[in-house]
Amino acid sequence: MKIIKILFLLVFSFSSFLKFDFASLIYTDVLSTKGVRKIDSHVERVAKRYGGSFYSQELAAFVPEDPERIRRKWKKYKDTLAERIGYIPNQFCIQRAVWKNSAQTVDELLEDAHKAAFDFRKKCELVAAMTGGSCSFGPQNKMICKSKASAERKIAKDVVNLNVPCSYAVEKLSDVLRGSIIVSQPEQISKVAGAIKKVFASHSDHVLFRNLWQEERESGYVAIHAKILFPVPGNKYEKYVIAEIQIHLDSIVNGSMECVKEREHLLYEKVREGSQEAEPVSAASTLLYLSAFKQKICFK
């Protein structure tokens, strides 16, 4: 034990000399491992009640032995939690179809997003304070603006899949500025939606909701998405970016890379890369979400 302490002190001292936080990096990795193990333990217990599971090294996740049974349980829990959330209508319509970012290039769009980020973050924090929730802008709050690489991948994909010019794909990118409001109880979600309308009242015509609790995605993903045509400050003429606020339960998103939503994202990256089939990935992802639901409601 003394040897470990001495080694840690040496690492800490060396990292200070180099002005690089090696010690924090080590500590973060330990926390990350603990977070994954905690979630996996819960997921395995849930799966055991509904037919069992096996651990896939390729997916780094538990895959249910009886995916159909897991899917039925997922739907039962989802619908029950959706009732507790209350009615939040889908508003993605023709009005949303005419929205566009003012920027014409990726660099200009990212510049606008960074300019708007401070005001956007303050409004999100106000919404969280009003509703007893918390804010997250990705792990360590570093993802409030989409990265250039991520934006370029999405734009390139849309250019090919939608057969549109690059400038059009830039105009339609709808989450270059984004954040999440996280709550502990389903009943808070509708309050958050109401607070978003109130806080963004100066441009209330530019706030629309999509209720994914009313959908049945193969991945099991659920959330409320608010799309906001957000003004970019400091310009001689009006400029806008399309921003997104996601409303989540804390059993699904907690701001870490180990949370259910981030792990689902990693699973589907394997499908997009072509290294894994969609069917086991969907089953593993649905099991993750079912385990998150079970933390909020008790059924047999």
Image (cartoon, helix red, strand yellow):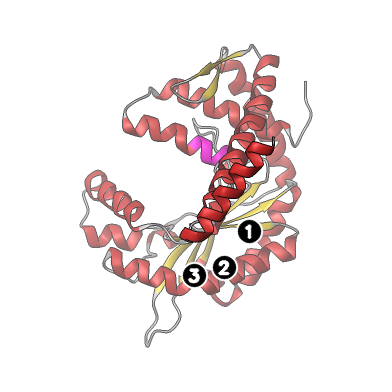
Q: Is residue 196 visible?
A: yes
Determine contact: label 2, label 3, CB under 8 Å. yes
Q: Which mark is residue 117?
A: 3
Tell me if mark 1 has few (under 14), some (14-19) or many (20+) residues whose alpha carbon lies within 10 angstroms of its own.
Answer: many
Q: Is residue 121 left or right of residue 175?
A: right
Q: Point out residue 186 in the picture as x, y percentages from the top left corner.
A: 72, 46
The quadrant of the rendering that contains the N terminus is top right
Inter-mark Cα distance, 1 to 3: 14 Å
Give the secondary structure at mark 1: strand
Nearer-the-camera pick, 79 or 34: 34
Q: Where are the magenta residues, as a range?
A: 258-264
The percent position of residue 248, horizontal first and vertical second, equals: 63, 48
> Is 2 one of the magenta-colored residues?
no
User: How far apart are the two marked residues, 2 and 3, measured between alpha carbons?
Assistant: 6 Å
Q: Where does residue 227 sit, x and y in percent of width and height?
A: 50, 59
Q: Amino acid at mark 2?
A: Arg
Tell whether label 2 touches label 1 (CB within 8 Å): yes
Q: Which residue is mark 1?
A: 135
Asked whether the viewer can see residue 245, the reply is no
**Left or right of 54: which side holds 132?**
right
Which quarter of the image is occupied by the C terminus? top right
Residue in the foreground of this view, choosing between 236 and 30? 30
Residue 35's place in the image compared with 159, above or below, is above
Residue holding disc 2: 121
- Pointer 1 with pointer 3, Cβ within 8 A: no
- N-term-proximal mark, 1 vs 2: 2
Residue ranking furthest to the bottom: 236
Dominant SS in magenta: helix
Residue at figure coordinates x 53%, y 48% from the top left: 25
**Residue 55 location in percent, x, y?**
54, 17
